[in-house]
Amino acid sequence: MTERKRPSKSPQPPATKAEDDSQMAGRIRDSARQIWLAGLGAYTKAEEDAGRFFERLVHEGEEIETRTRGLVEKQVKAVEHRVEDVRDRATGTWDRLETLFDERVAGALRRLGIPRREDLEQLEQRVAELEQALAEQQEAAPRSIQGRLPGSDEEE
């Protein structure tokens, strides 16, 4: 039997440098195109997400504003309450000091023998009452008695 020789697969002739460069350029072009497309996809995704992200940021900002406004209002009310308490205490202290001062001055005036306003008003009222009573008595007295009283017109 004769042996048949199988055709041997001959290796392809080695690629030339120009073919290698061309293949490398194609791969680089494919990679660059994929990078470009990935960038476009990322940009589109970011653009879509930006609107939602912005809305979420606005919503969170509103929540923070609401919480902080409540805290600030509570602090303002607390400060106002404290100021009111201090004002009330200060007013009470001034009122007590004023009363104490008035009492001391009134005591000093009494020791010096100077009458109070109330004393003078009582005296004025008493004098007015006496003048009215005297006028009533003079009207009721007969004319002859009036002539004998000092200060009457008939003596002159």
Image (cartoon, rainbow, N blue to C red):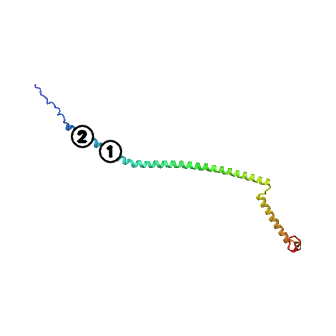
Answer yes or no: do the residues labelled 2 and 1 have beta carbons within 8 Å? no
Residue 32 vs residue 58, the one in the foreground: 32
Location of residue 118 by image quarter: bottom right
Quadrant the N terminus occupies: top left
Under circle 2, the secondary element is helix
Label annotation for residue 39:
1
Pair 2/1: label in front: 2
The mark that comes first in sequence, 2 or 1, is 2
**Crowd class of label 2 (few under 14; some 14 to 19; many from 20; radius 10 Å):** few
Q: Which residue is mark 2?
A: 25
Residue ID at (37%, 48%): 48
In the displayed structure, does residue 13 sit left or right of residue 138?
Answer: left
Location of residue 114 by image quarter: bottom right
Q: Residue 145: x percent and y percent?
A: 89, 72
Q: Is residue 89 above or below residue 128?
A: above
**Crowd class of label 1 (few under 14; some 14 to 19; many from 20; radius 10 Å):** few
Residue ID at (24%, 40%): 25
Q: Residue 45: x percent and y percent?
A: 35, 46
Q: Is residue 34 above or below residue 12?
A: below
Quadrant the C terminus occupies: bottom right
Residue 85 vs residue 120, the one in the foreground: 120
Q: Amino acid at mark 2?
A: Ala
Q: Residue 4: x percent and y percent?
A: 12, 28
Residue 52 vs residue 39, the one in the foreground: 39
Q: Amino acid at mark 1?
A: Gly
Distance of label 2 from label 1 (alpha carbons): 21 Å
